[in-house]
């Protein structure tokens, strides 16, 4: 019988920040499937269409809708929910928005993480924390060489810089307060690639933009058709964070701050245009694509992530290749928008995608799935 993550999450009190967001909603559902007692802390969802709005609310022990920078509210939530592990996903994650709201992006991402770690420190319980940053936390010279964990941090746009700053916050709190402190839990950071999957309706992201074009029949505008990204299904990044959490809970080494890349294999480092072409094969439609628009802001052109450290130390590997990732993503939206599926059907379908991802991981003999 398969026991994902060695059953470590069964009965565990887990706090997911950013649970109303794309990744956080999938994470909450998966943790619930694993038998965890899940609580969430985030701002309200951006869109009534988002996956979070489909989730049964009794899935959460507690769902707090508040700002991660609000220390007293966050401290209350941690004191009440007494998490044994926190997955910190709450962030302003859109590069374009970081040009419009730079301070909000910086304070949410970097200071919000510092605030969370301060609350955990005051809480004085052995609570492990996995902080989610990004492939964009590295200084990018657009060489296309996949980043390794010890490459220099950087980022010229504010979002990327804020994720590099988040890494520095965690590193500083680790060496100043958490390292060798028997009262506190272990810390780690996870850096994933460009994530796609059902239930994302954010502005200024390629898959939600594609779905909006399908529904409205308006032209899809590609600002950087030839920019390459490490595409992966949302479940790939989450299996990485969960495998990392499993390590922190099962074999905590407080001396060491673990940081891992959870990127796809190089075959999934594709251009935006290739993603769209693959999508249209899965869900043919009559809509036009415009590639003549000028980008409104600067963004990295090439981005790749080397996951060999996660493979050698955690036994983590990608499960779904590029084609399977796009197929499973398109199927989710097609069922919702063309098939007119009910909320219950969409949740059942989302659960079935989690189950088939775990089964594929088990058949590929990936450590966390066996
Ligand atoms: N989606 C991707 O491709 C991708 C890639 C790499 C890293 N990430 C990281 O993964 C995490 C989750 O991203 P996502 O794609 O689910 O984003 P999302 O926008 O769908 O969700 C963000 C979540 O953070 C919450 N949030 C934002 N500001 C907040 C604040 N001030 N206080 C409390 N909560 C706040 C939102 O309410 C939401 O729940 C982020 O840290 C993001 O930077 C995402």
Image (tube, rainbow, N blue to C red):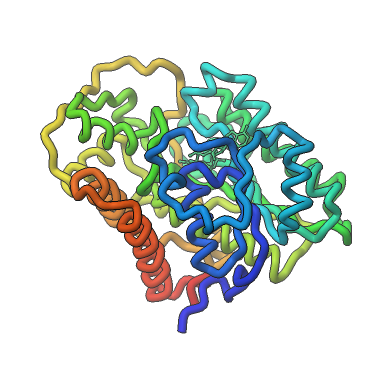
Residue beneath the point at 60% across and 53% down:
260
Measured as percent of width and height from the top left, residue 209 is found at 31, 32
Measured as percent of width and height from the top left, residue 73 is found at 74, 39
Measured as percent of width and height from the top left, residue 354 is found at 40, 63
Measured as percent of width and height from the top left, residue 105 is found at 60, 26
Residue 153 seen: no
The residue lying toward the viewer, choosing from 345 and 156, is 345
- Splitting the image into 4 quarters, where does residue 279 fall? top left
Residue beneath the point at 46% across and 46% down:
52
Position above or below: 177 against 71: below
The residue lying toward the viewer, choosing from 305 and 200, is 200
Position above or below: 184 against 77: below
Label tally? 0
Position above or below: 61 against 202: below
Residue beneath the point at 52% across and 18% down:
99
Please indicate whether residue 235 sits to the left or right of residue 186 in the image.
left
In this view, the residue farthest toward the bottom is 1
- Splitting the image into 4 quarters, where does residue 112 fall? top right
Residue beneath the point at 76% across and 57% down:
256
Please indicate whether residue 323 sits to the left or right of residue 12 in the image.
left
Residue 147 seen: yes
Q: Quadrant of ligand 1?
A: top right
The residue lying toward the viewer, choosing from 29 and 363, is 29
In this view, the residue farthest toward the left is 286
In this view, the residue farthest toward the front is 58
């Amino acid at each position: 019988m398969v026991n994902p993550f060695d059953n470590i999450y069964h009965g565990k009190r887990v706090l997911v920040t950013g649970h109303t967001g794309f990744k956080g909603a999938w994470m909450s559902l998966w943790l619930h499937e694993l038998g965890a007692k899940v609580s969430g802390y985030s701002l309200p969802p951006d869109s009534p269409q988002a996956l979070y709005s489909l989730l049964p609310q009794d899935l959460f022990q507690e769902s707090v809708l508040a700002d991660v920078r609000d220390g007293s509210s966050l401290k209350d939530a941690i004191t009440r929910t007494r998490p044994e592990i926190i997955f910190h996903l709450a962030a302003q994650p859109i590069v374009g928005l970081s040009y419009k709201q730079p301070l909000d992006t910086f304070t949410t991402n970097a200071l919000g993480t510092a605030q969370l770690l301060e609350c955990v420190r005051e809480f004085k319980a052995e609570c492990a924390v996995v902080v989610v940053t990004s492939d964009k936390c590295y200084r990018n010279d657009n060489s296309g060489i996949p980043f390794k964990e010890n490459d220099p941090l950087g980022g010229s746009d504010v979002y990327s810089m804020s994720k590099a700053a988040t890494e520095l916050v965690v590193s500083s709190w680790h060496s100043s307060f958490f390292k060798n402190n028997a009262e506190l839990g272990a810390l780690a950071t996870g850096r994933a690639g460009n994530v796609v999957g059902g239930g994302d309706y954010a502005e200024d992201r390629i898959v939600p933009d594609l779905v909006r074009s399908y529904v409205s029949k308006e032209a899809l505008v590609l600002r950087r058709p030839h920019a390459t990204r490490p595409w992966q299904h949302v479940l790939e990044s989450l299996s990485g964070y969960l495998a990392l959490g499993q390590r922190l809970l099962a074999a905590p080494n407080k001396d060491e701050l673990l940081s891992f890349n959870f990127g796809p294999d190089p075959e999934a480092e594709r251009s935006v245009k290739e993603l769209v072409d693959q999508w249209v094969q899965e869900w043919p439609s009559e809509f036009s694509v415009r590639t003549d628009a000028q980008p409104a802001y600067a963004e990295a052109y090439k981005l790749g992530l080397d996951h060999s450290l996660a493979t050698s130390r955690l036994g983590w590997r990608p499960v779904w290749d590029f084609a399977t990732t796009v197929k499973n993503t398109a199927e989710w939206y097609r069922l919702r928008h063309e098939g007119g599926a009910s909320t219950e059907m969409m949740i059942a379908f989302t659960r079935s995608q989690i189950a088939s991802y775990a089964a594929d991981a088990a058949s590929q003999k990936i450590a966390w799935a066996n």
